[in-house]
Each structure stands twice: as structure tokens, then as C-alpha cells.
Amino acid sequence: MGALVNAGHRDRVAGYIERGEQAGAELVVDGREHPLVEESKGYFLGATLFDRVTPAMDIYRDEIFGPVLCVVRVETFEEAIALINAHQYGNGTCVFTRDGEAGRRFSDAIEVGMVGINVPLPVPVAFHSFGGWKESLFGDLHAYGPDAVRFYTRRKAVSQRWPQRSQQESAQLNFPSN
């Protein structure tokens, strides 16, 4: 993960890491301790990994937009789907499975804008739509894909009918009756 946009953003993300610790999440990797944090002249945080995160924690409820990954554990497949669908945001989520039926059921049932199946980050290439659903979408269009083309395009609908005419037929100046 590269540098964050400014000092305020870096401090905001670092605050989430601190609040995650205080809330009782298990801090597995602390990005604040990455060597580049001190060496860089920019606004850098290393990758951070929390385990044992619960839905009551800020680090679960909020979109952090920084190098912070939270692991939330559930007992069943259905519980995982219900947990994700109950969240106010719907940007992206992933499932890792060797069961094609489980992957299909997950992608059909999940209420988010980007779904990865055996893909760790479901951000597609630029010609696909990028962005979430629910509170994860800003505005009414997605950043890439058909929505971006529509944003920069003036579309026109043309309806046409070209009936076959015979060689002897000349221009007709009345409304066709066929």
C-alpha cells in the first residue's frame, strides 16, 4: 500500500488502528510499526491486520480507506451472508472456496457492488463497473465501466425501418399503410 493522501488521512487511519486495539480486536500486524513510516517523508502506513473483529467495533462498521484488513469470524455460511448484507456499506467482499455451488450462492445472495470468488481484492479492470452498493456509492454512477462511458457520452436513440421497395417504385409522399 502506498502513501495516504495527506497527514489528516494518515492520522485518521492510525486512529482506527488504535481504536481497534482498544475495542479488543487482536492486532496481528501493526502498520504503524512499518520501517517506511519513519523513513518516508510522506504519509505512509504499512499493512495492518486485525483478527477477532466484531460488528460492534468501529473498524468493522466504518469504511477506513487505508491499509487495514479486518477478519470477522462466523460459524456458518448463512451467518456470513447475513452479516455482510446487514452492513450499511456494500463496496466489495470475497469468498475463498473450492465449491462452485458455494461461490455461486455467495455471489447471488450477497448485496455488494464487487464480489471476488477466490480473488483477494474484487477490483475489476477499468472496463467493468467499480464501486459499491448502499452507502458505499457516492453519486448515482460508478467510477469505471459502462457508467463512466455514459457519463462522458451523449447518447442518441435512432429508430429505423427500411422496407424493401421494388425497382419501379418512386418516392411516395403519403404515410405507408403496410
Image (cartoon, rainbow, N blue to C red):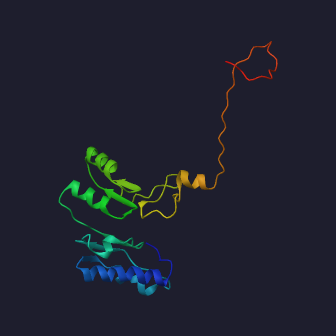
- In the depicted view, which residue is nearer to us: 142 or 94? 142
Query: Based on the displayed image, in which of its 4 quarters is residue 51 positioned?
Result: bottom left
Would residue 36 be seen by someone viewing this image from the given angle?
Answer: no
Quadrant containing the C terminus in the rendered view: top right
- In the depicted view, which residue is nearer to us: 78 or 101? 78
Place of residue 1 in the rendered image (x, y in percent of width and height, measured from the top left): 43, 72
Question: Residue at 81% of width from left, 21% of height from top?
Answer: 171
Place of residue 64 in the rendered image (x, y in percent of width and height, measured from the top left): 39, 73
Going by the picture, which residue comes out furthest to the left? 75
Question: Residue at 26% of width from left, 83% of height from top?
Answer: 22
Would residue 114 be seen by someone viewing this image from the given angle?
Answer: yes
Question: Residue at 39% of width from left, 70% of height from top?
Answer: 63
Tally of marks: 0
- In the depicted view, which residue is nearer to us: 84 or 44? 84
On the rendered structure, is 156 left or right of 35?
right
Question: Residue at 27% of width from left, 81% of height from top?
Answer: 21
Seen in the picture, residue 162 relative to 45 is either above or below; the reply is above
Seen in the picture, residue 98 relative to 138 is either above or below; the reply is above
Place of residue 98 in the rendered image (x, y in percent of width and height, measured from the top left): 26, 49
Seen in the picture, residue 30 relative to 159 is either above or below; the reply is below
Place of residue 61 in the rendered image (x, y in percent of width and height, measured from the top left): 33, 71
On the rendered structure, is 131 left or right of 101?
right
